[in-house]
Image (cartoon, helix red, strand yellow):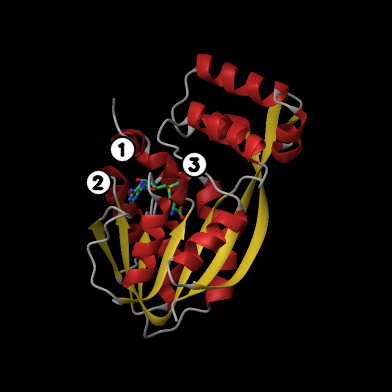
Amino acid sequence: MADTKDLVKQQYGLHAESYVTSSVHARGESLKRLVELIQPQKDWRALDVSTGGGHTALAFAPYVREVVASDLTPEMLAAAEHFIRGQGITNVEFRIADAENLPFADGEFDLVTNRIALHHYPDARRAIAEMVRVCKSGGLIGFTDNIVPPDKVTAGHVNHWEQLRDPSHHWEYPIPRLVAMFTDAGAAVEHTQELTKEMEFDPWADRIGANSELKVKLRQWLETAPEPVRAWLMPRRDGAQLFFTLHEVVLIARKP
Ligand SMILES: C[S@@+](CC[C@H](N)C(=O)[O-])C[C@H]1O[C@@H](n2cnc3c(N)ncnc32)[C@H](O)[C@@H]1O
């Protein structure tokens, strides 16, 4: 059986371009909040872990000296490079890197960012420890990911639904678990904020290449889920369109 990292490379390798054009990734509120909260400085060297389509690297590049954009999936990194270079940006470097084994020295970066990717990592604690390790003392880690509610049963339902859509989805965590992982890795969490994002079902399912049979299953699951799950995901119809809500955390941590 393929492990999660093989599945990640398979999924994102096939659908790289749809993550470059995805409006959720390109224009999400969490990206704006990350830049506002972090206040990046001209002399900083930043690392973007799991850059995907490159939107976080691109958002920070104009404000800092250099960004290293890294990802596990070669096709994804190539798509990000093509996209970022196409914007006339020249201070971004591209490196293949597994978030759980970052190929960088201790304290290399003033800023480490990681947006909407932790839920793919088999060992989230290790990836967070790696982000803290490569960050300078006094430097910042700017993190976002989709979250689940603290109630374990509802959290399990939501995660299993996400896994049905995307087998490379590993696990999403509630905010207190994420705060504990950063704290255990030796970082001081300075800010957490929960955001919600309105999701349109079809582009969300299409982005990962779901076929019509899978889309029927995902839609049915969403509309007939137990009440606490529906209270969290809030499925709703507008004409023929199905919408739901995802919750995301923006977390800023400092390495002492
Ligand atoms: C949703 S995309 C990231 C979105 C992007 N950060 C943004 O702001 O638009 C998820 C990315 O995580 C990457 N990824 C998954 N597992 C990884 C791992 N173990 N190490 C590094 N990257 C990984 C995938 O290749 C994919 O490009």
> At numbered mark 2, what does the secondary structure look like: helix, strand or loop?
helix
Q: Nearer the viewer, residue 228 or 88?
A: 228
Res 222 quadrant in image:
top right
Q: Which residue corresponds to the image point at 26% horizontal and 55% vertical from the top-left?
A: 97
Q: Position of residue 134 (x, y in %)?
A: 32, 71
Q: Can you say whether 254 is above or below 145 in the image? A: below
Q: Can you say whether 151 is above or below 62 in the image? A: above
Mark 1 is surrounded, within 10 Å at the Cα level, by few (under 14), some (14 to 19) or many (20 or more) other residues, namely some
Q: Position of residue 186 (x, y in %)?
A: 44, 72
> At numbered mark 1, what does the secondary structure look like: helix, strand or loop?
helix
Q: Amino acid at mark 1?
A: Gly
Which numbered disc covers residue 171?
3
Mark 3 is surrounded, within 10 Å at the Cα level, by few (under 14), some (14 to 19) or many (20 or more) other residues, namely many
Mark 1 CB lies closer than 8 A to ligand 1: no
Q: Which residue corresponds to the image point at 31% horizontal and 54% vertical from the top-left?
A: 100
Q: Amino acid at mark 3?
A: Trp
According to the picture, the residue beneath numbered tag 2 turns out to be 74
135 left or right, relative to 190:
left
Is there a contact, CB below 8 Å, between mark 1 and mark 2? yes
